[in-house]
Image (cartoon, coloured by chain):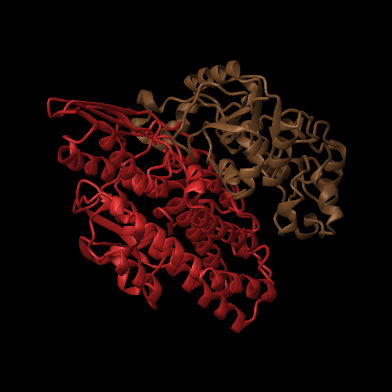
Amino acid sequence: MAKPKIAIFDFACCEGCQLQIVNLEEEILSLLGGADVVEWREAMSEKSDEYDIAVIEGSITRLEDEERLKLIRSRAKVLIALGACATIGGINKLKNNFDDLDEVKKCVYGRAASKPHLHTGPTKAVGEVVQVDFCVHGCPIDRKEFTYIVRSLLMGKKPEIPDYPVCVECKAKGNPCLWQYDQVCLGPVIRAGCGARCPSNGFRCFGCRGYTSNPNVDAAKDVITRYGLNIDDLKTKMVLFGSKQEPTIYE
Amino acid sequence: MSKGTVNINVHHVTRIEGHGNIVLNAKNGKIEKLEWQVPEAPRFFEAMMRGRSYEDIQTIVSRICGICSISHSLVATKAVENAIGVKVSEQTDKVRLLMHYSEQFQSHVLHIGYLVAPDLFNAPSVVPLVAKAPDAVKTIIGLHRLANEWSDLIAGRTTHPVTLRPGGMTKVPTEAELRALQDRIKKCVPDLKVVADVVYSAAGNLPNFERPTEYVSLKQDNPPTYTFYHGEIASTDVEDTVAVNDWKTVANEYVVDQSTAKWTKWHRDSYAVGALARFNNNAELLSPMAKAIAQKFGLKKGCCNPYMNSIAQLAEAVHVIEAAIQLIDQLLTKGVRQETVRVNPRAGKASAAVEAPRGILFHEYEFDRKGTCVGADVCIPTNQNHANIQKDFEKLVPEILDEPEDQIRLKLEMLVRAYDPCVSCSTHMLDVKFVR
């Protein structure tokens, strides 16, 4: 049987998730030994139009990028969204909170803002443009989870992605709850699978893996009330990665 | 076959971070178009920061760049602290510097080993080199792994740190963890010598090209240090340094049609930042082993061959190792403890600068009295190099126009890579279009 061909593409993002693939070091060779990597601009000079699995990093902000993504989708049998920019739009979605994108452009480029090459639309996650088959969540992705998902696919199995909140993993690690230290932590509603990396380092969860498919909104409201905060305190934290995600806790 | 007629169009240069194009059209020895273009999708970070809390700034700006996320987080944290009037402890300052060294080391090893080495050994990527030089590749992988585990320990993660907060750290490593890290760092010294020898064996493939330009970097006088993290802005064109808060008088940013990233200029049409700029301003302050590396490759202060930037990075990688060993000694001598942090924000506006692996990086923020961000400005090293890359192209191409098209293309691509551009950063961008 021929080895499946994998191609890795990047759109608007920081390329930190691709870097996590590089960071697999020698493991990358054994992982990808079962496949042919035919295109990966950040690491190789080779290019190709034929592939079975397309890995998409980044969010979509321009019409020309939508067209390129649709073409990739039409060529690939399986499409994987890699990292928060691709899975939920990520931090790039912060700009969608401005009513007027022209204002956003002027803020950065001043009087030159109207130049055509600076045109950009609202940020979209990959799934808002084409069908996504699998998501590798997180900002950046977790190397082990990426390995697990790719290995599962290469073996013809469906990978299991956690659909319970970060609090579950955080409690299992025995971490003290950051709410007790005045930090507005999104652990109660955000999808686990990261091993509660941030709270384990004393830093609040800011939601890079997106919500669980059925977030326990009531529990989150209880927590806010218990610590004497209001919904606005929570909104300002949720917006970092949660902008325009559905369902949102503050509906 | 070229006879001075060339059409080169490298759309999206490979083995760099982000998207950039090289376009060269020349007919009968006359250059019709020669451009370094940056088409990366603009992302508007400065606007995205508005309305966010001072506590969230480092989390947002870290996402400007995956490769220099630690530099962005550090400079943002420093600028926020300057703006809201918070001082940090000596321990915090030292732990952050140790975190910063991990990124310099990681980024330089990645750039030299994975992105530049394939050009020197005539390979399209590092993958074929595994078969050609398995031991050297394994050594590089081992060094890269060390750098990442070093970041993991101090920053909480390899990319996008989670231990920084305005006023201090959420977590610092234990003394036992620091000792274990120091042991590993000491053991990597022989590996660095192996890498230096391998690069040296192919250093003859670095093009011999010179163009005098202005080199800009941080400079620290008190105490005199080969600095990545403290100090003021220095230039090879002038004696006096400039205060970091006045960085806009240095960068003078402007928008050009061939790029979604802004360009900069100071005393000339363009200036350069990065390892070679730091070397040209501070070479005498390098560690003894780093000086020996520079000498081995014939790298001297005043060097204006941009391809030598990779060699300056190699010297810096060695320097960082020696500096980190000393820094850990200093931390251990004083003893490490978890510190509690209390911050009361106030209204204010301030800047900060650090040296990202690819050059000097400026951030500026303004906050209202509740600590809500009302203004942000970020000036990235790769932006400061774009104009200089264009000027290098304009001097280099006439010198090599008679060479075969593949050779011209390779030299242009290698030139761009030598700057170690980080294009996502610069649009907050790389690609070669080549038509001779």
**Front residue of this view, candidates A192 and A114:** A192
Task: Chain A: give its colour.
Answer: brown
Q: Where does residue B86 sit, x and y in percent of width and height? A: 55, 65
Counting from the top left corner in percent of width and height, residue B106 is at 51, 57
Residue B249 visible in the current orientation: no
Residue positioned 74% across, 40% down in the render: A148
Q: List x then y, in percent, for residue A245.
A: 70, 30
Q: Which chain is red?
A: B
Q: Position of residue B26 (x, y in %)?
A: 18, 27
The answer to whether one can see residue B368 in this image is yes
> Which quadrant is home to the N terminus of chain B?
top left
Question: On the rendered structure, is B211 left or right of B169?
Answer: left
Quadrant location of the C terminus of chain B?
top left
Residue B128 vertical position relative to residue B285 in the rendered view, above or below: above
Image side of residue B51 versus residue A223, left or right: left
Residue beneath the point at 47% across and 65% down? B192
Q: Is residue B398 left or right of residue B114?
A: left
* Nearer to us in this view, B405 or A217: B405
